[in-house]
Image: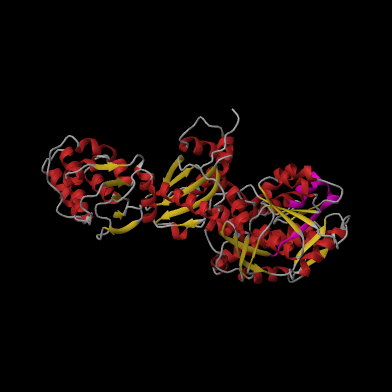
């Protein structure tokens, strides 16, 4: 292999480690190819490149970005770097075996003991390099890494000293761009691997189990005592493996860990987020080698088993039904037309709108003609922290999403879409698909009421919002119905059987609850209480600024679950109140439409309305 030639390097896994490595190799003049199973992340990197922030600041575009390792076959790679979690490596290596060639060298760029042996089992020890990474970062968006630290140098070496030249070339590439890396022999790279793993094992599971940052863990004398004992166990096991550390290694470990700062180690983040961890290659390996030499590793064993128990509860049960099965369940539930094949949707240009409401997050996917093909919702404050991510993953694995838009309360802090827009504009865009021209839109949501006035061009001319906390909203309805002991799903039906014409005197939830209880104590029938609540909300809406003489269209989650509200309002305004089908998804539909329009404006030569016909 000649260093003078433009080397081709593939990177499997574009998390923080893979992204930073890719940028540095690109700076060194390599032709870099990227691969990741996360279709949304791949899409973002393909469109916007990799962005590094903080320690490094750059934006780098890449030509070769794939979802499958096998797509790299045509590149005839010189190096293939595996920057995955250790438990993902074997599957990726077996998939990548098709890339094997006489010149290919594979690199294990992961934390943990024996991760290089996973690659060696597929490619052979004489083709495998081990790298010890001493940099890290956090993803702030799918294609953006905040580089948190680089404690030089990185280390790399041939695991059997048979390909030292390939190791030296790779080392030289990184050093040329000031990404300090040291080439080592097989014994020294093994030693550095154990050093790094002992550091990771001493604090990562403790932080995960205790929900502690590194700084918090190292500021408490009791947890520091645990850390010290874990380090000592690791050192004793390593020495039985003929790995000798310097006399001050223990002290250096503690000094290093005390500089950890207010952040969580990677394993701790995985555990906190109910994801599978790499504990088997951290503390688990120390336990394994301890058993080999009859060395007690009580604390490493305890933390290994605790982390496994916690992940078994959260993740392992889900692994029985793989991500593919979970995706299928989500898509099956949300798909509008279930008779089309998955290939059909992958071949169509589609657009995603996400409405992050205070109570629910709604997803709508439309096709090239603007027709909804998928609708789904989850609780915004979901106990399952991965619920929203699972839906997004299912959408991107099924539909060819060209562009996306987020709206609603949470839009400003949501980074997984191309653009964000206000719910006012998205509501106008969604309603315009059903009712053209000037109109009033009433949107009763979880925590507010909006009245939107649209002009003849379907643009927002003005809008008004309720001015008293969550009075008259979905949250108000929920609390009041609970106090009246009326099932929320029965309210509309009950109210429709009443001629009661009295409203609540107060919109303060506390006082309204008291008033409802007086109605109950007075023996008022449930249907009258239900109608009284609706009348109160209708009177609240009637006091807002509606333009006389214009059509009134109702949207939002409240009208979706309380259809009798439109009857009450029709009586109040003495005119027909129209309700759009699936009113709770109108705003997410509008977001999808805006995504489609934005993408069309940037791709004017593309016929968006041209639907691809697949053979039967």
Residue 376 drawn in magenta:
no
| 579 on left or right of 216 | left
| Residue ID at (48%, 44%) | 365
Q: Quadrant of the C terminus?
A: top right
Residue 124 drawn in magenta:
yes
Point out residue 525 in the picture as x, y percentages from the top left corner. 14, 38
Quarter residue 219 falls in: bottom right
Whether residue 485 appears in this view of the structure is no
Point out residue 68 in the picture as x, y percentages from the top left corner. 68, 45
| 523 on left or right of 270 | left
Residue toward you, 236 or 264: 264
Q: Which residues are magenta?
A: 115-134
Q: Quadrant of the N terminus?
A: bottom right
Point out residue 565 in the picture as x, y percentages from the top left corner. 23, 43
Point out residue 608 in the picture as x, y percentages from the top left corner. 52, 45
Residue toward you, 259 or 168: 168
Residue toward you, 614 or 388: 614
| Residue ID at (52%, 47%) | 392
How many circles with numbers are drawn on the protein?
Answer: 0
| Residue ID at (51%, 29%) | 339
Q: Main secondary structure of the magenta part?
A: helix
Whether residue 290 appears in this view of the structure is yes
Quarter residue 14 falls in: bottom right
Residue toward you, 84 or 580: 580
| 98 on left or right of 535 | right
Residue, far top: 616
Residue, far left: 522
């Amino acid at each position: 292999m000649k260093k003078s030639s433009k080397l081709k390097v593939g990177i499997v896994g574009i998390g923080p480690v893979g992204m930073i490595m890719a940028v540095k190799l690109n700076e060194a003049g390599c032709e870099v190819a990227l691969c990741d199973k996360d279709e949304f992340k791949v899409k973002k990197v393909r469109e916007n490149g990799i962005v590094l922030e903080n320690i490094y600041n750059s934006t780098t575009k890449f030509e070769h970005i794939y979802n499958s390792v096998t797509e790299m076959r045509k590149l005839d790679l010189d190096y293939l770097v595996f920057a995955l979690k250790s438990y993902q490596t074997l599957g990726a290596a077996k998939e990548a075996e098709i890339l094997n060639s006489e010149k290919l060298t594979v690199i294990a760029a992961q934390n943990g003991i024996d991760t290089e042996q996973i690659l060696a089992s597929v490619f052979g020890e004489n083709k495998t390099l081990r790298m010890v990474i001493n940099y890290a970062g956090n993803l702030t968006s799918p294609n953006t890494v905040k580089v948190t630290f680089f404690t030089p140098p990185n280390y790399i070496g041939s695991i059997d000293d048979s390909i030292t030249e390939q190791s030296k070339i790779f080392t030289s590439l990184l050093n040329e761009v000031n990404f300090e890396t040291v080439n080592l022999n097989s014994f020294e790279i093994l030693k550095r691997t154990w050093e790094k793993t002992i550091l990771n094992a001493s604090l990562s599971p403790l932080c995960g189990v205790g929900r502690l940052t590194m700084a918090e863990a190292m500021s408490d004398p009791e947890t520091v005592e645990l850390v010290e004992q874990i380090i000592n166990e690791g050192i004793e096991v390593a020495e039985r493996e003929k790995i000798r550390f310097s006399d001050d290694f223990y002290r250096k470990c503690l000094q290093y860990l005390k500089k950890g700062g207010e952040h969580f180690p990677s394993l701790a983040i995985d555990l906190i987020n109910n994801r599978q961890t790499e504990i088997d290659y951290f503390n688990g390996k120390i336990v394994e080698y301890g058993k080999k030499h009859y060395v007690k590793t009580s604390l490493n064993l305890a933390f290994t088993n605790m982390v496994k128990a916690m992940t078994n509860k959260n993740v392992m049960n889900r692994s029985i039904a793989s991500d593919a099965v979970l995706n299928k369940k989500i898509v099956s539930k949300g798909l509008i037309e279930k008779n089309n094949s998955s290939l059909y949707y992958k071949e169509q240009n589609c657009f995603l709108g996400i409405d992050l409401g205070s109570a629910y997050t709604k997803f709508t996917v439309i096709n090239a003609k603007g027709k909804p093909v998928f609708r789904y919702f989850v609780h915004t404050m979901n106990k399952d922290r991965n619920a929203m991510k699972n839906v997004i993953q299912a959408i991107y694995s099924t539909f060819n999403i060209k562009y996306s838009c987020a709206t609603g309360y949470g839009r400003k802090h949501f980074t997984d879409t191309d653009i964000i827009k206000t719910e006012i504009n998205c509501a106008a865009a969604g309603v315009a698909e059903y009712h053209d021209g000037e109109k009033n839109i009433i949107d009763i949501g979880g925590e507010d009421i909006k009245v939107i006035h649209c002009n003849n061009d379907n643009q927002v001319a003005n809008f008004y919002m309720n001015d008293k906390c969550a009075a008259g909203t979905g949250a108000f309805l929920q609390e009041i119905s609970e106090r009246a002991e009326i099932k929320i799903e029965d309210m509309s039906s009950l109210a429709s059987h009443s001629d009661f014409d009295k409203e609540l005197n107060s919109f303060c939830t506390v006082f309204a609850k008291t008033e409802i209880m007086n109605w109950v104590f007075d023996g008022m029938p449930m249907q009258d209480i239900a109608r009284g609540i609706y009348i109160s909300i209708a009177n609240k809406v009637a006091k807002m600024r509606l333009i006389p003489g214009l059509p009134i269209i109702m949207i939002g989650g409240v009208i979706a679950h309380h259809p009798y509200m439109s009857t009450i309002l029709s009586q109040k305004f003495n005119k027909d109140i129209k309700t759009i089908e699936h009113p709770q998804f109108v705003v997410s539909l509008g977001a999808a439409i805006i995504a489609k329009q934005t993408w069309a404006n940037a791709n004017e030569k593309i016929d968006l309305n041209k639907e691809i016909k697949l053979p039967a």
